[in-house]
Amino acid sequence: MAGLLAATGCSNEVPSDATASDATAVITAPIDVAHAVPITVGVGIDSAADRVEHVALGSTVKLTLLDPEQAEQYFVDGYALGKDVQVAKGIPEIFQFVADKPGTFALRSQTTQTVLLTLQVG
């Protein structure tokens, strides 16, 4: 996923031992948490392949995922959403990212490839 992504509990701060070039690599787009577009998905509750969420290009998205049945990993096509972040069973996980690519992107289960919603950016 292009742009800066942050999972709950992660920081947007650059480690104190990072060099100037490390900082450039870590922070690629500002995250405007105060004006984030909230999207909440309950797996098996309000998730569906035909669910479409529209966001403006350049918007910060605050995506909250909850899977009441099992722990799972999820991803958004075209973005690096929470790579290797396990969403625990019954506990919401929040991912924030900048929707900096126009187009249509599916939110999917890493295991089953099931589409939970489609994100329309533009």
Image (tube, helix red, strand yellow):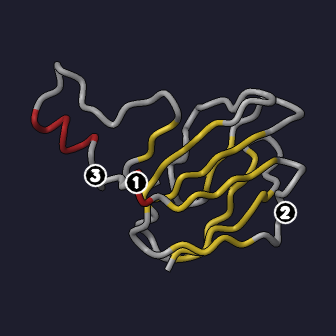
Instruction: Residue 48: give its label.
Output: 2
Dot 3: element? loop
Q: Measure how far apart labels 1 and 3 are at the Cα level.
A: 18 Å
Three-letter residue code for mark 1: Ala
Disc 3 crowd rating (10 Å Cα; few below 14, some 14-19, many 20+) is few
Closer-to-camera residue (32/119): 32
Instruction: Please say if the residues under marks 1 and 2 sit with CB atoms less than 8 Å apart.
Output: no
Farthest residue toward the left?
Answer: 20
Quarter where residue 24 is shown: top left
The amino acid type, in three-letter code, at marker 3 is: Thr
Q: How far, Cα to Cα, is label 1 from label 2?
A: 28 Å
Identify the residue shown where x is 78% and y is 57%: 116
Q: Which numbered tag is attached to residue 3?
A: none
Mark 2: which amino acid?
A: Ala
Q: CA–CA distance between discs 2 and 3?
A: 31 Å
Mark with earlier residue (1, 2): 1
Q: Residue at x 58, y 32 (%)?
A: 84
Q: Which residue is mark 1?
A: 34
Q: Which residue is mark 3?
A: 28
Q: Nearer the viewer, mark 1 or mark 3?
A: 1
Residue 7: percent from left, percent from top: 51, 37
SS under mark 2: loop
- The percent coordinates of residue 78 (x first, y second) are 53, 60
Which is more N-terminal, label 3 or label 2? 3
Label 1 vs 3, first from the N-terminus? 3
Residue neighbourhood size for the residue with mark 1, other residues' Cα within 10 Å, grouped as few (<14), some (14–19), many (≥20): few
Closer to us: 27 or 32: 32
